[in-house]
Image (cartoon, coloured by chain):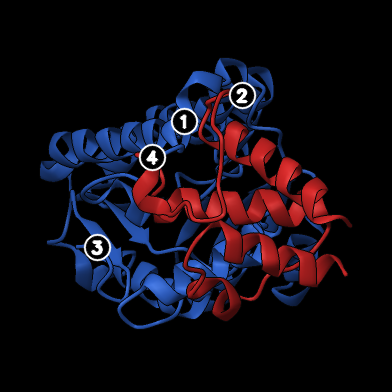
Amino acid sequence: MATYLITGASSDVGTALIRRVYKSGDTIIAQGSGDIEKLRALAEETNGAVHPYDVDLTSTDAMDAFVAEIREKFDTPTHFVHLPALRMVNTKFKNFDEERFLLDMNVQVLSALHICKAILPAMAKAKTGRVLFMLTSYIIGLPPKNATAYIVAKNALRGLAQSLATEYAASGITVNCVAPYMMETKFLSDTPDLIVEASAAANPMKRNAQVTDVVPAMAFLLSEEAGFITGAVLPITGGAAY
Amino acid sequence: MEKQQIFEEVQEIFRTIFDDEELEITREMTADDIEDWDSLEQINLLVAMEKHFNIKFKLEDVHDLANVGEMMDLIERLVG
């Protein structure tokens, strides 16, 4: 029986992943921020196996309280999936918004760091664990222009994943990342259609990624049989980057 | 909307996107004439114009735009 901790779980990917991996007897601790209705519905569907938490990850206090609650109330997670990010802002470097960048670093990087620090030592004692971070294909090869904040945060997350992969390999914990091409989800709700269409046209497979392209790959990396894969950044890009 | 007004407003958008307050556009100007005008900036330009003029481009309509003049003609048609 597995205990999943999923941050950013209220996203389209998060809810699809829960549906994909949940088996009777599992516990799923599911964090969202301000939009956890879908998680409440999943809690009902699973007879309470999904535990929704509304936590603002931009706040370190809220994050600390969440981590403390997880340690107190649940068994050590066997799986930690980290999905949250602030929406990408297309802006020139001279207009770099440091305040927003720091919020994004809290949401994406510090939250992962705090949670890993809280649970990985216990996972290591159990000699098993799966950790998975959501990155972006933008970190493969040349990054796009005007996306510095997003790229820096995602690369920090990759650095964290790969450092942990090395440090915990001997303990049976795998730490991997997925790097999808532009994914058509509600995360793109502020992105003009023209950008989404141009991205699809620029892809060798002439389309953007869908949740159904990404979730099965995530489920595989979280599975028992992926135990010899760690430190990997898996491109899910239709051939656009690898 | 008058052609001249569209021209002036498009010029302002170009100046903002390419961060050059002295940029003077012409109808014949193409991506070859502005160093930073690549495919990403092309999309940024078009998105800024969609927002400014409250119009919506189709990807197939903007794909074959040969120069700034054709871009302005398309805006004029969409603004009506």
Label 3, on which residue?
A241
Amino acid type at mark 4: Asp
Label 2, on which residue?
A100
Return the residue nearer the eye: A162 or B73.
B73
For the N terminus of chain A, the image quarter is bottom left
Can you tell which mark lies on residue A149? 1
Q: From mark 4 to mark 1, how far is it between C-alphas?
A: 20 Å
Residue A213, x across and y down, in percent:
42, 78
Note whether residue A8 is visible: no
Badge 3: few (under 14), some or many (20 or more) residues near its Cα, within 10 Å? some
Can you tell which mark lies on residue A53? none
Chain drawn blue in the picture: A
**In the rendered structure, which disc, 2 or 1, sits on the residue that comes first in sequence?**
2
**In the rendered structure, which disc, 1 or 3, sits on the residue that comes first in sequence?**
1
CB atoms of marks 2 and 1 within 8 Å: yes
Residue under mark 3: which chain is it in? A
Can you tell which mark lies on residue B36? 4
